């Protein structure tokens, strides 16, 4: 079964509460905000956080190379 993309209007990431992006090649709904992908099984999105896979580090968690404690 195919995922109904009209559902993107009402579905959000259960963790960030932000919109999800559909990846048809991998059959996943991706939270770009958190960097996680939720699988779609038989056309039904599985939005259980424990079943999601990490696709990248969230922007906030990436080390930008600065330390606030330098020179103290």
Image (cartoon, helix red, strand yellow):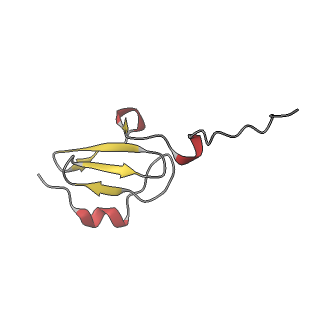
Say if residue 9 shows up in the picture: yes
Q: Position of residue 55 (x, y in %)?
A: 37, 40
Q: Residue at x 14, y 55 (%)?
A: 2
Q: Position of residue 35 (x, y in %)?
A: 43, 45
Which residue is at the far left? Answer: 1
Side of 34 relative to 3 (left or right): right
Choose between 60 and 12: the one closer to the eye.
60
The image quadrant of residue 62 is top right
Q: Residue at x 85, y 34 (%)?
A: 71
Q: Quadrant of the C terminus?
A: top right
Choose between 60 and 34: the one closer to the eye.
60
Side of 66 relative to 33 (left or right): right
Q: Residue at x 61, y 43 (%)?
A: 64
Say if residue 46 shows up in the picture: no
Side of 64 relative to 50 (left or right): right
Q: How many marks?
A: 0
Side of 50 relative to 62 (left or right): left
Which residue is at the far right? Answer: 72
Vertical order, 63 against 7 (above or below):
above
Q: Residue at x 48, y 57 (%)?
A: 18
Q: Position of residue 59 (x, y in %)?
A: 54, 47
Which residue is at the far front? Answer: 71
Choose between 13 and 31: the one closer to the eye.
31
Q: Position of residue 17 (x, y in %)?
A: 50, 54
């Amino acid at each position: 079964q195919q995922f109904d993309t009209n559902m993107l209007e009402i579905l959000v990431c259960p963790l960030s509460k932000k919109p999800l992006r559909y990846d048809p090649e991998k059959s996943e709904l991706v939270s770009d905000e958190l960097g996680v992908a939720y699988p779609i099984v038989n056309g039904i999105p599985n939005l259980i956080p424990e079943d999601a896979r990490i696709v990248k580090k969230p922007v906030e968690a990436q080390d930008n190379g600065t330390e606030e404690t330098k020179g103290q």
